Image (spheres, grey):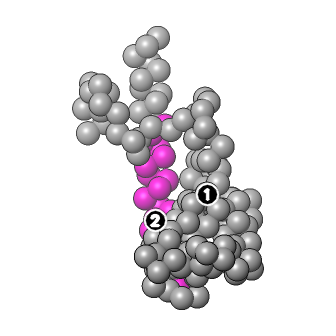
Amino acid sequence: MAEECLKSDVKFFHFELPLEEGACLPRLARGCGAGVEYIAVTPNGEMYPCHQFVGHNKFILGEITEGVINRKLREEFVRLNDINSKSICKDCWARYLCGGGCLANNFNINRDISKPYRIGCEIQKLRIEYALWLRAKRMEVKV
């Protein structure tokens, strides 16, 4: 697959890392954005941090007509979208390219939004390794 990616003009999103510049660069060090950069709104007007939390009442942020009411929950999502607040990630080499993963995956697997999904971490590290390898190979070809 690696050699095929090098030959192709098609760029696969998950193997493209904006390492030099652009709007996505600062986002690499942040989390998934749930409850901070976006929210999900149900047909009934309930607001959730992300579509994957819909139906879990403890994650209702508020109502579309009233705005965010559960400020404590919103603050928790803001905190968890900062990679430096995640002690379990503090020694990980990939933390500033990963952002700490998906909070919904954390909840769905561990029943705790603050506890990273370990298999997801390993998959993400492999994805980042491959993306960095691919970037290095492309740079060699250009030289």
**Relative image position of residue 80 (x, y in whole percent):** 68, 67
Q: Main secondary structure of the magenta part?
A: helix
Instruction: For label 1, count other residues whose C-alpha is less than 10 Å away and answer few (under 14), some (14-19) or many (20+).
Output: few
The structure residue drawn at horizontal position 47% and vertical position 61%, both measured from the top left corner, is: 122
7 with respect to 85 (left or right): left
Could you tell which of marks 1 and 2 lies nearer the N-terminus? 1
- Secondary structure type for disc 2: helix
Residue 139's label in the rendered image is none
The structure residue drawn at horizontal position 64% and vertical position 54%, both measured from the top left corner, is: 30
As drawn, 131 above or below 111: above
Q: Nearer the viewer, mark 1 or mark 2?
A: 1
- Secondary structure type for disc 1: loop
Mark 2: which amino acid? Gly
**Which residue in the structure is indicated by mark 1?**
37
Q: Is residue 103 visible?
A: no
Was residue 61 drawn as part of the magenta stretch in this picture? no
As drawn, 86 above or below 22: below
As drawn, 36 above or below 114: above
96 with respect to 53 (left or right): right
The structure residue drawn at horizontal position 58% and vertical position 88%, both measured from the top left corner, is: 58
Q: Name the quadrant containing residue 8.
A: top left
Q: Which residues are magenta?
A: 111-132
**Which residue in the structure is indicated by mark 2?**
120
